[in-house]
Image: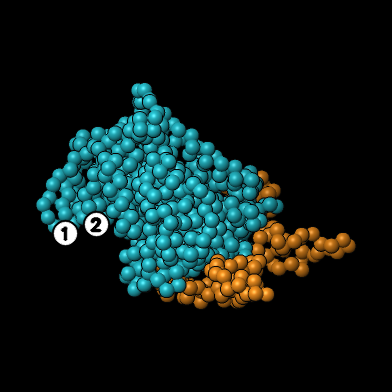
Amino acid sequence: MFSRLLPRTATRSALQAQNQAPHILRSSPITCLLSDRISQRRGYATPAEEKDLVIIGGGVAGYVAAIKAGQEGLKVACIEKRGSLGGTCLNVGCIPSKSLLNNSHLYHQILHDTKNRGIEVGDVKLNLEQMMKAKETSVNGLTKGIEFLFKKNNVEYIKGTGAFADEHTVKVNLVDGGETSVRGKNIFIATGSESTPFPGLTIDEKKVITSTGAIALKQVPKKMVVIGGGIIGLEMGSVWSRLGAEVTVVEFLGQIGGPGMDAEISKNIQKTLAKQGMKFMLNTKVTQGDDSGEIVKLDVEAAKGGKAQTLEADVVLVAIGRRPYTSGLGLETIGLETDNKGRLVIDSEYRTKIPHIRVIGDCTFGPMLAHKAEEEGVAAVEFLTKSYGHVNYGAIPSVMYTHPEVAWVGQNEAELKEAGVKYKVGTFPFSANSRAKTNLDTDGMVKFLADAETDRILGVHIVGPNAGEMIAEGTLALEYGASTEDVGRTSHAHPTLAEAFKEAAMATYSKAIHY
Amino acid sequence: MRLTRVLLQKRQPLIKFLGKRHTPKQVDHTPHAHPASPTHELPESFASYRTRAQQHGPLGAAQTAQPYGAIGGRPGRALGPVEPKKGEYWDRNELPKRFHRTRWTAAEMEALESGGASMFG
């Protein structure tokens, strides 16, 4: 009983106040108050320790920072409210979507691309439930793997929703009930992002879905409309198109793939996806939607004004982008500010205006990519432990996992033109690559952009098989400040798809051999 | 000799090994705009907060010697063992005041002796 009355840690002033007004002991609500005050005064023999680092959010940015901090010997706690680690990426983003993309591609290939390869297959049926189970197995394996890494690196995993109580304290509403609080000398905010809703449409994750619903549909829709022709829209559109849905992509801009994709590459992949059965409506805006009935109706018209028409769909995928997720974090309690897009404002060392509170990942500046968040997690911890860290925002690759894949790093032609940079271009098609030929998978090309004078690589853009893996070489070259000649004079094994990469580099400073 | 000259005239790759990585001795920790910031500038609040803030000692002083403050700048493990050397003893009263023994107040003593009943009396 006494321990409850006199629990731990505290200031003398609190008890002085009690001494000055002893009568308050007699009132029961105030007794609680006094008890709290006393509790702030006297500590137990082993008071709750202050962590070196508290991380709010166990997504890619948060968990990577937590593991790195554990490796560096910091006492670290990571707060995650989802109940499983890995954030959007592992639970409802990159990982489950890649499982569906891979398996739906296999299904589509078995259905449509086996006879000319000399493989006769019998009755091919889709078992969507099993495909979803395969996805869940991958996801569970990976999220549990992170929990193991937490234990291995002495990271305390707190399951709950964190909110700032003050600049050093985070109050946590625990998933299993109750609450606790944790103090940190340093605090990282890594709360990620959420899908941007479309005004006028209610997301129910059944008829009107975001990427979260798109990886968990119970049946293949007959008609699907995708609002937004960016990476998420095209990947999830691809999945359901391969499984049998009639997919129409409505995009406000004049090209698919989002703003970073090179226009030539974008046209190339659009042509290929159209061949696979996807329909595209570019320069088109959705003016309003009606999701009150069984079928969702969307009114669309040309972006610059024009004839309106109504699209009908069983399922509408809203993929118009993502926005930082910081609600409920108690930013107002400590006076942290966000910019006009909801991003937390930080300096070059990830510090907010309160220097011991840093922000990493989707909820601050930069592209919303898991690998960018991962880099920031490591760099931010290094700023704590080594006083310096580094992320090169000019060499962060982007990948779209359609088939063929699209990948790029550095600048595209439009960006170079806008910056007034003189550049040269070298391309090589996969149709001239021996490995692509043997794989009967020859759609696409590799494109280099290099400084016209120095030959330094400024951008690499790939559409084709294995582009997502191949871009790693481009990123390394860009990071090292390589010239196209450096790449072109580096031996690449034969026969590999990577030879297309080398030949495109050769085509930039000289001529390709096989084209 | 001639062969060496010919070899040296060959193309030099742009990618070169720069040698073992060294920790920079002087790192400028004054706040600068984040490279991916769309505005390329920091709000006024960054400077004003630092001017008035006092966290683990004055921020301004901490920034020069230990950028992250005397406390919390390094992991506890790096600070070494806390036990006194053999034959040495520490007197609690020599420690900063916050480590001194907290005196029992009359109210606490009463609570103790009454088994906590005085808190509800």
Q: Residue at x 70, y 58 (%)?
A: B77
Element type at marker 2? loop
Element under disc 1: loop
Chain designation of label 2? A
Q: Residue at x 70, y 61 (%)?
A: B78
Residue A121: give x, y in percent of width and height: 38, 25
Measuring 52% from the left and 41% from the top, which residue is drawn there?
A142
Q: Nearer the viewer, residue A193 or A183?
A: A193
Q: At which x and y percent is residue A41?
A: 62, 58
Q: Quadrant of the C terminus of chain A?
A: bottom left
| Amino acid type at mark 2 | Gly
Mark closer to the chain start, 2 or 1: 2
Which quadrant of the rendered structure holds the N terminus of chain A? Answer: top right
Q: Nearer the viewer, residue A17 or A186?
A: A186
Q: Which residue is mark 1?
A: A304
Report the residue that reaches farthest toward the front. Answer: B2
Q: Is residue A460 left or right of residue A199?
A: right
Above or below for B87 versus B42: above
Query: Is residue A72 something that shows in the picture?
Result: yes
| Chain assigned cyan | A
Q: Is residue A98 above or below residue A412?
A: above
Q: Is residue B48 above or below residue A338?
A: below
In the image: residue A408, left or right of residue A294: right
Chain letter for mark 1: A
Crowding near the residue tagged with mark 2, few <14, some 14–19, many ≥20 C-alpha atoms within 10 Å = few
Q: Which residue is mark 2?
A: A254
